[in-house]
Image: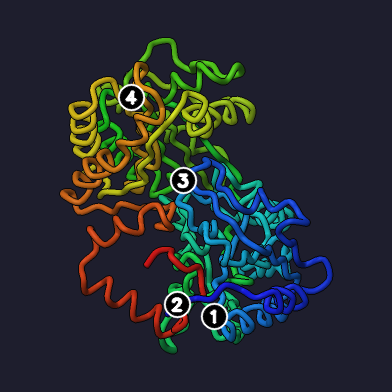
């Protein structure tokens, strides 16, 4: 289905539907922050940014877009990394920002649930849960600006997937405006409901191509009363996998976070952040940042110390430090959280957000590193990420003697090499960032035609005119 260029009359109707103060118009308002993603890889144009303040206004907008065959691009906090939230360059697509729909509607501590608007930031949700002595465990570097609708639409993961699961595991129901303009109220706090297709799971991870999520019922958890954090130097990546198994066995599955950090990535942080310091006296090629948490104080540290001691005796761990205070814990976390920012300061980078079975992570790191360094001598791999769930951010920094644009021109070549290794290990080319525009064509190479046909059939059934986030995902 071919979409139309919105006429002046259609733009006027859309602006009216958004309500007072709900429309920003190209030419009279500064739309720049809605039109480019933070890495600068994708920049589009749009005649109109709509910012509805309630669900009924959004439903009116979608109905008009469907009637007139106008493409709409849902946008949350604009923190996505694959271009899924950015319009194309045609100037015909209208952005729908959820930023004004940002209320915490209700919290039920006994049911361990919270109902929120899609425009709530992740940080606001975390804070609201904490005020009720509850935990919402999703944690991302962009949590101060990313919005719940966006993290749902991309099925974001973060650092605690090992213990609590990704966003799809943390939501019980959603409210959404479908491409027809109908409002689906799926805001149920039920944990067991076998009454048909799971539309919540379908919309979660759909990247706005099947509807616009407007609200969600989120799972809450008891707030941990004891947390122990360690930064440990390892023999090699295989030692990380073995240490994870030992910690899980010793703690009874209480490992919340298990992040692998390469020396190359740590050195970038130490170089670009003045307040960063190396936590260990001797250097190592590999480290892990591990965290365990429980509701009872007094015994978890002994478990961690004993397990680390045994791992040292076995030659898996060469050195380790345990956080003795909240400030030291935050300093250790900053080493991990600042890696993407440090790599951006270092120059051009080619990023891969991939996953393989946890047991295959060492093989992936070895094979992918060999592949890219053979093809491009001097390239600097900076792998890090959530080894506890098999998700590795296999990022490449430009060679010191190569210009950034020339390096980025070889993005597809590097993709082919890295994704080829991922496919050989039965992995995924997108573990948490989504598909968007960046990986849309790649998806066709790594998904079966049966799976792709099913995805297209679902898309056509719910969105026959193709107005929802056109050109993304499928």
Q: Is disc 4 placed on a helix, strand or loop? A: strand
Marks 3 and 4: which is nearer the front?
Answer: 4
Q: Say the numbered circle drawn on residue 380.
A: 4
Residue drawn where x is 58% and y is 62% of the image: 91
Residue drawn where x is 49% and y is 25% of the image: 322
The front one of 255 and 30 is: 30
Visible residue check, residue 151: no
Asked if marks 2 and 3 touch (Cβ < 8 Å), the reply is: no
Q: Is disc 1 placed on a helix, strand or loop? A: loop
Spatial CA distance of label 1 from label 4 is: 46 Å
Marks 1 and 3: which is nearer the front?
Answer: 1
Spatial CA distance of label 1 from label 3 is: 46 Å
Q: Which residue is mark 3?
A: 256
Residue drawn where x is 58% and y is 45% of the image: 142
Q: Position of residue 3 (x, y in %)?
A: 50, 76
The front one of 71 and 427 is: 71
Label 1 environment density (alpha carbons within 10 Å; few <14, some 14–19, many ≥20): some
Give the side of residue 46 with respect to residue 308, left or right.
Answer: right
Q: Which residue is mark 1?
A: 69
Q: Which residue is mark 2?
A: 2
Answer with mark 2 or mark 3, whichever residue precedes in sequence.
2
The front one of 107 and 211 is: 211
Q: Is disc 2 placed on a helix, strand or loop? A: loop
Label 4 environment density (alpha carbons within 10 Å; few <14, some 14–19, many ≥20): some
Q: Position of residue 297 (x, y in %)?
A: 57, 41
Spatial CA distance of label 1 from label 2 is: 8 Å
Q: Is disc 3 placed on a helix, strand or loop? A: strand
Extreme residue toward the right, this view: 20
Answer with mark 1 or mark 3, whichever residue precedes in sequence.
1
Relative to 449, is 339 above or below?
Answer: above
């Amino acid at each position: 289905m071919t979409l139309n260029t919105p006429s002046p009359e259609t733009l006027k109707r859309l602006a009216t539907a958004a309500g007072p103060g709900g429309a920003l118009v190209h030419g009279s308002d500064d739309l720049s922050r809605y039109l480019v993603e933070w890495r600068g890889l994708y920049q589009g144009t749009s005649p109109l940014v709509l910012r509805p303040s309630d669900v009924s206004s959004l439903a009116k907008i979608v109905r008009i877009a469907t009637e007139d065959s106008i493409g709409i691009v849902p946008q949350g906090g604009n923190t996505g990394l694959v271009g899924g939230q950015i319009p194309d360059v045609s100037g015909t697509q209208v952005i729908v920002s959820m930023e004004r729909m940002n209320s915490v509607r209700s919290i039920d501590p006994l049911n361990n649930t919270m109902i929120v608007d899609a425009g709530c930031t992740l940080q606001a949700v975390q804070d609201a849960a904490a005020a009720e002595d509850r935990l919402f465990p999703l944690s991302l570097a962009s949590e101060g600006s990313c919005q719940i609708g966006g993290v749902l639409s991309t099925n974001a993961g973060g650092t605690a997937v090992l213990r609590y699961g990704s966003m799809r595991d943390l939501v019980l129901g959603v409210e959404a405006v479908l491409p027809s303009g109908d409002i689906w109220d799926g805001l149920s706090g039920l944990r067991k409901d076998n009454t048909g297709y799971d539309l919540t799971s379908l919309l979660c991870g759909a990247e706005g191509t099947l509807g616009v999520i407007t609200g969600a019922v989120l799972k809450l958890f008891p707030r941990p009363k004891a947390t122990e954090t360690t930064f440990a130097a390892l023999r090699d990546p295989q030692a990380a996998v073995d240490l994870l198994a030992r910690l899980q066995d010793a703690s009874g599955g209480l490992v919340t976070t298990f992040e692998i950090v390469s020396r190359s990535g740590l050195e970038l942080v130490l170089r670009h952040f003045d307040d960063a310091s190396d936590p260990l006296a001797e250097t190592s090629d590999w480290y892990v940042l591990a965290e365990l948490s429980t509701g009872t104080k007094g015994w978890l540290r002994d478990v961690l110390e004993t397990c680390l001691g045994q791992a040292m005796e076995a030659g898996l761990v060469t050195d380790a430090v345990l956080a003795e205070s909240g400030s030291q814990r935050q300093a250790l976390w900053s080493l991990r959280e600042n890696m993407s920012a440090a790599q951006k300061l270092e120059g051009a980078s080619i990023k891969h957000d991939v996953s393989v079975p946890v047991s295959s992570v060492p093989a992936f790191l070895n094979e992918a590193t060999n592949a890219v360094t053979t093809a491009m001598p001097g390239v600097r791999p900076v792998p890090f990420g959530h080894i506890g769930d098999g998700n590795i951010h296999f990022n490449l920094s430009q060679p010191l003697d190569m210009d950034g644009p020339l390096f980025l021109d070889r993005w597809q070549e590097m993709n082919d090499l890295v994704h080829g290794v991922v496919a050989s290990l039965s992995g995924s080319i997108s573990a948490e960032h989504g598909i968007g525009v960046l990986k849309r064509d790649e998806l066709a190479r790594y998904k079966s035609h049966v799976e792709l046909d099913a995805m297209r059939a679902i898309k056509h059934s719910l969105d026959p005119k193709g107005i929802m986030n056109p050109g993304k995902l499928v």
